[in-house]
Image (tube, helix red, strand yellow):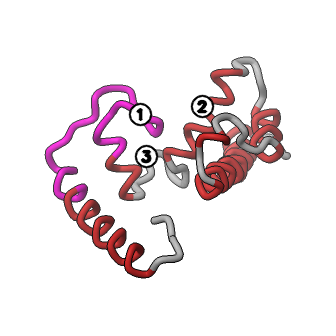
Amino acid sequence: MLKYNDKEFDDFMKTIDDEVNTRANECMNYIKHVGDCTCVGVTCNKCILEQHLGIDTIYGMSGAMGSEISDFFHNNPNASAVECIKYLENTPHEKYAELHTPEFIATWNQNRKNAAIWMEQYAHEKLGETI
C-alpha cells in the first residue's frame, strides 16, 4: 500500500486493502488459470489475484520480477543470462516515467534489482554460470 502524509486517508486505504485481500482470498477457490500464464499473467484473473496476494508461481520470483526478465528476453532473444543481469542491475525504468509518480518508478526499479538478484542465483544454480 502506498503511504501518503494524511493519516485519515492512509487509514481509509488500509481498510480498502484489507477488504480487497479478503475478497481476493475468497475468489482464489473459484477462478482457474486461463492457459500458459505462468508468472506473467497480465490477462489472467487468477494470476493477477496471486500476484496481489504475494503468491509466487516460480519460487522466489514475483510476477513483477518475472515480467522484467521476460521483457528483457523478449526484446533480446539471443542474450545470455549475464547480459540480462547486467541490464537489470544497471538500467533504471524510464519508459512512461512522466506518466507515473516517483513511488511507482521506485517500485519498478526495485523490482528490476530484485529480478537481477533472482536471475544471478538462477544462473549460478541452474546454468552453472558465475557472475
Q: Which residues are magenta?
A: 24-48
Asked whether the viewer can see residue 85, the reply is yes
* Residue 121 visible, this orientation: no
Q: Are marks 3 and 2 in contact (CB under 8 Å)?
A: no
SS of the residue under disc 3 = loop
Label 2 vs 1, first from the N-terminus: 1
Examine the residues drawn in magenta and state their main secondary structure: loop
Relative placement, left or right, of 20 versus 112 is left
Taking the magenta stretch, the answer to whether it contains residue 81 is no
Q: Compared to 75, does 44 lie above or below? A: below
Q: Residues within 10 Å of mark 3 (few under 14, many from 20)?
A: some
Report the Cα–Cα distance between label 3 and label 2. Answer: 14 Å
Q: Is residue 82 left or right of residue 62?
A: right
Residue depicted at x 22% and y 64%: 22
Q: Point out the frontmost of discs 3 and 2.
A: 2
The residue beneath circle 2 is 70
How packed mark 2 is, by other alpha carbons closer than 10 Å (few <14, some 14-19, many 20 or more), is: some
Q: Residue at x 65, y 50 (%)?
A: 105
Question: Nearest the camera: 129 or 62?
Answer: 62
Spatial separation of the CA atoms under disc 1 and disc 3? 14 Å
Q: Which residue is mark 1?
A: 42
Name the residue beneath numbered marker 3. Answer: 57
Q: Position of residue 34 (x, y in %)?
A: 28, 29
Residue 125 drawn at (x, y percent) = 69, 47
Earlier along the polypeptide chain: callout 3 or callout 2?
A: 3
Q: Amino acid at mark 2?
A: Ser
Task: Say which amino acid is labelled 3.
Answer: Thr
